[in-house]
Amino acid sequence: RERNEGKALLWQQLKAMLIKKFLVNVRKWSVASLQVIVPPVITL
């Protein structure tokens, strides 16, 4: 029983790590896409 709880805790930590990584990637990607999209608009 305790082993299952340990596994669940490990899974939660893993999930949290993946979500954090995903959010960081999304932020990087959105910043990059803004840098691509915004300059042409400004030059217009």
Image (spheres, rainbow, N blue to C red):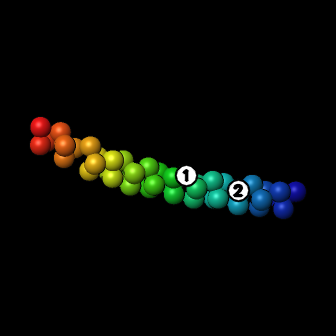
Q: Secondary structure at mark 2?
A: helix
Residue 15 image point, x, y percent: 63, 53
Residue 2 image point, x, y percent: 84, 60
Q: Give the camera-side residue of 10 and 30.
A: 30
Tell me what residue is drawn at x 45 percent, y 55 percent.
Answer: 25
Specify the farthest residue to the left.
43
Q: Earlier in the sequence, mark 1 or mark 2?
A: 2
Give, as a three-letter code, the residue at label 2.
Trp
Residue 35 image point, x, y percent: 26, 50
- Residue matched to label 1: 19
> Any mark on residue 11, and which?
2
Tell me what residue is drawn at x 70 percent, y 56 percent.
Answer: 11
Q: Quadrant of the N terminus?
A: bottom right
Q: Quadrant of the C terminus?
A: top left
Circle 2 packing at 10 Å, graded few (<14), some (14-19), many (20+), is few
Vertical side of 37 occupied by 10: above or below: below
Nearest to viewer (mark 1 / mark 2): 1
Real-space CA distance between mark 1 and mark 2, rounded to the nearest whole angstrom: 12 Å
Give, as a three-letter code, the residue at label 1.
Ile
Q: Give the camera-side residue of 44 and 5.
A: 44
> Any mark on residue 3, and which?
none
Tell me what residue is drawn at x 40 percent, y 51 percent.
Answer: 29
